[in-house]
Amino acid sequence: MPVTVGPYGQSQPSCFDRIKMGFMMGFAVGMAAGALFGTFSCLRIGMRGRELMGGVGKTMMQSGGTFGTFMAIDAQQQLRTAPPQLTGQQRTDNLGEFLKPVLSTLNYASEVYLHFHPLKTQTEGNI
């Protein structure tokens, strides 16, 4: 897929940049989760002081590395399966094709409802 250049000279990020960004976001989330889980697990087994800091740090690095790796893989997979860019009119056309079955079902349901529950006319009057 060719890289497009915007009106101010900016371009889309490269494949490596997207993978790197996915890894960094996953690493940050994994570090936060590792801090929570590591703190609770280390306190539960009775660690204190320097031992606690080492255990929490180790858990944070393990969680960050693991989650970052999977997020990088996911970012790469999204690049390979990304749909082509659509214009606004194409998106509207696709939405219309998507909604046709829904609208036809609603139309049929309203016809059935009106068949069994006819609307009252003005001459019948209100009770």
Image (cartoon, rainbow, N blue to C red):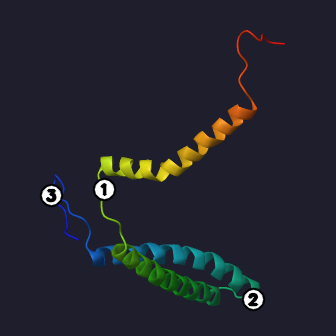
Mark 2 residue type: Ile
The residue beneath circle 1 is 86
Tell which of 27 and 96 is nearer to you: 96
Q: Residues within 10 Å of mark 2 (few under 14, many from 20)?
A: few
Q: Which percent across, then down, holds residue 125?
A: 78, 10
Q: Earlier in the sequence, mark 1 or mark 2?
A: 2
SS label for mark 2 = loop
Tell which of 79 and 10 is nearer to you: 79
SS label for mark 1 = loop
**Taking 16 as reference, is 117 left or right?**
right
Q: Earlier in the sequence, mark 3 or mark 1?
A: 3
| Marks 1/2: CA–CA distance | 55 Å
Q: Residue at x 19, y 60 (%)?
A: 10
Asked where in the image residue 126 lies, by quadrant, the reply is top right
Quarter that holds the C terminus: top right
Q: Earlier in the sequence, mark 2 or mark 3?
A: 3
Mark 1 residue type: Leu
| Marks 2/3: CA–CA distance | 56 Å
Q: Which percent across, then down, holds residue 92?
A: 37, 47
Mark 3 residue type: Gly
Q: Residue at x 75, y 30 (%)?
A: 117
Q: Looking at the rendered structure, which numbered label has been put on residue 9?
A: 3
- Look at discs 3 and 1 and give the one toward the viewer: 1
**Taking 34 as reference, is 22 left or right?**
left
Tell which of 85 and 73 is nearer to you: 85
Q: Which percent across, then down, holds residue 11?
A: 20, 63
**Taking 123 as reference, is 33 left or right?**
left
Vertical placement of 69 versus 91: above or below?
below
Q: Looking at the rendered structure, which numbered label has been put on residue 45?
A: 2
SS label for mark 3 = loop
**Taking 52 as reference, is 95 left or right?**
left
Tell which of 23 and 124 is nearer to you: 124
